[in-house]
Image (cartoon, rainbow, N blue to C red):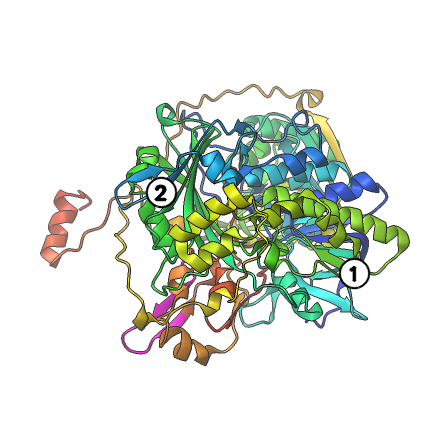
Amino acid sequence: MSETVRESMEFDVVIVGGGPAGLAAAIRLRQLSPETSVCLIEKGSEIGAHIVSGAVIEPRALAELLPDWKERGAPLNTAVTAEEMLYLTETGSVRVPFLDKLMPHMANHGNYIVSLGEVCRWLATQAEELGVEIYPGFAGAEVLIENNRVAGVATGDMGITREGEHGPNYQPGMELRGRYTLFAEGCRGSLTKQVMAHYDLRKGVDPQTYGLGIKEVWEIPAEKHRPGLVQHSFGWPLDDQTYGGAWLYHFGENLVSYGFVVGLDYPNTWLSPFEEMQRLKLHPAFRKHLEGGRRVSYGARALSEGGLQAVPRLTFPGGALIGDSAGFLNVPKIKGTHTAMKSGMLAAEAVVEALASNRPEPASFTQRVKDSWLWEELRTARNIRPAFARFGMKKGAIYAGIDAMLLKGRAPWTLHFKHQDNEVLKPASLCEKPAYPKPDGQLTFDRLSSVFLSATNHEEDQPVHLRVKNLSLWKTVNWDVFRAPESRYCPAGVYEVVDEATDPRLQINAQNCVHCKTCDIKDPAQNIDWAVPEGGGGPNYPAGM
Amino acid sequence: MKIVVPVKRVVDYNIKPRVKADGSGVETAGVKMSMNPFDEIAVEEAIRLKEKGVATEVVVVSIGVQQAQDTLRTAMAMGADRAILVLSEESPEPLAVAKVLKAIVAKEEPGLVILGKQAIDDDMNATGQMLAGLLGWGQGTFAGKVDVADGSVRVSREIDGGTEEVSLTLPAIITADLRLNEPRYASLPNIMKARKKPLETLNAADLGVDMTRRLTVVSVAEPPQRQAGVKVGSVSELVEKLRNEAKVI
């Protein structure tokens, strides 16, 4: 908390986060009520700077929000034209037949391969034209709670030194006060976490389960490029106990989006999502697309996989949770953009209603969600991800096929998640170490050259934003039992063990952080708290991400 | 005294530039753009001179595409009073820029023009010098320290192996080097206020300046890939390699 007097400004609605959910909410608010003042802040240096997604998007919500999106020049330029789902063994692959029957969620007819960062930049221009005030480069650092009502957020102070003193360029944060505040921080938002705790929003719902997605953009030779091609895979290199898979999309000007998602409920502490992602490129099914190309970008982000069972209470006095802050991703579809946008639009409608009647809580949001196609989607998809958690990959896939073909998502039962992702990690002595190949510099790379391509930067002289609450716990739990899993799951090389042989210590290279939030989720003792760094810090993902 | 500060919108310094596949230039589509860091230093210096009471007004100018107004807003959020955007194609050549600035100087009649020493995109390091030549004003380039007093300005210039002190009669041209100051953050309240500060838009043609390109880009290529290092066993092997392989001694 800062002692200096902060400036403050009043808005009708404050939105934290400039992703698809926050921007869709902002646009809908001004469409419904042009007099409503809307302020949106984004911790990235510009809109899109922190957006990582595959992304194949379903334009359903966009078409509801801006029916003339094509005429307005939305950057949805590559329609999906061909689609494959592969089951991989170490050297071979089997194409899943009758994909549209067995995995109807995966059917991508009518969908588009996009750079979600570009889509967000475009949505931001639409929002600004409608009069939304957008301020990138400012992180929401503090929730203002007054008389048990969320009264807005405060941005972080700038120019605090590493020791926590006011530096020469010190600028106090600012209070952005809103009659309603929408949290659209994406998966595992740092303010969302505080709001959930304060209002006990997760009471009575399943623990959230997460995935970590790691993505690269490649530029490949024109003769190899097949715009519109979508390839998904599961199986190798992950074992049957680990949920995950890969994507490869041809889009844009000779670009390929390649990425890999691992369920963060993986048990093997030696597993390294980054290295799994790297070695998968050596498989013939991926190598043939990427060989001869060059990698142009890199990024990573956690995503919510809990689905319907893990959706918390959505509203509280003074605001609501939207998008992946609430966990609206549709896992079997592996899509969350359309649901995020839809939730933002529905929240906007509820807020406009609450503004008119001056109710403290935009409570009708919950009912609006339950009456919408968003809820129907999550309801029919609800048993698939937990089936993988319960039965493993192979049997889980069979369950998913039966669920889709025979039950059509209408099973009279609901499978539940029982554990938090950090609780399922097994001690190092009980796990087998995978043998990861050394990077070859052509198809596979190390962490540091990868982070370099994410254009990540943080002002050097600032307090470390990855807060280890109890340092001694690191030695007794993280090191002695699990052998520092953070040094493997972090896709950016933030966590490093030094003096391993003599006196192992944790070194935190906070400047590398790509804001994926995995450490906040997977740390076995929940001892790492991801707080926002100085605004504008973090990755600067270019177009294509 | 009024100070004019030209600012350029360039590919952000955090971004690894990517050469277009056809070698015609650097990819700027969808790439984050921001103010040239040396121009930020120039803006900061001008604002400090205003805060000291030496200057009365700081006018920022950018020459380029419509989006350059974001760069001008940033400068105004830092503390500049108003802005002029001269519309032209992206990244015009230094001589054309200097000619536009000469026309702006004729209109604004500043006592000082402070520029960044160079833009980090093309690294030309020419505009300040050309503007001084066109105006016939004194120039203090690579400034590491600036003191204005009694109709003249003392500039400490960063030169090879030390500094050089020059004294210039006003009006004059200064180009900012890295160590001149550390620019401030644009605070959120100031960014909000900057949205209401005046921004005038002109066309290069209205100023009577011919923006035709006089330079031809032959090709743009990325630096060659660095080869992996080797460990040498002895000093004599090192000397041998330096002499016969690297051919540096």
Which of A213 and B202 lies nearest the eye of the viewer? Answer: A213
Which of A444 and B239 lies nearest the eye of the viewer? Answer: A444
Q: As displayed, is residue A160 above or below residue A34?
A: below
Q: Is residue B190 left or right of residue B35?
A: right
Which element type, helix, strand or loop, lies under badge 1? loop
Spatial CA distance of label 1 from label 2 is 47 Å
Amino acid type shown at disc 1? Gly
Which of A199 and B152 lies nearest the eye of the viewer? Answer: A199
User: Mark 2 and mark 1 in contact (Cβ < 8 Å)?
Assistant: no
Q: Residue at x 62, y 45 (%)?
A: A377
Residue A318: numbered disc = 1
Membership of A497 in magenta stretch: yes
Which of B132 and A103 lies nearest the eye of the viewer? Answer: A103
Residue interval drawn in magenta: A493-506
Q: Nearer the viewer, mark 1 or mark 2?
A: 2
Read off the chain for label 2: A
Residue A523 % position (x, y): 47, 68
Q: Which residue in the rendered view is the most extreme toward the right?
A: A357
Q: Is residue B177 left or right of residue A147?
A: left
| Of pointers 1 and 2, the one earlier in the residue sequence | 2
The residue pinned by badge 2 equals: A87
Q: As displayed, is residue A476 above or below residue A155?
A: below
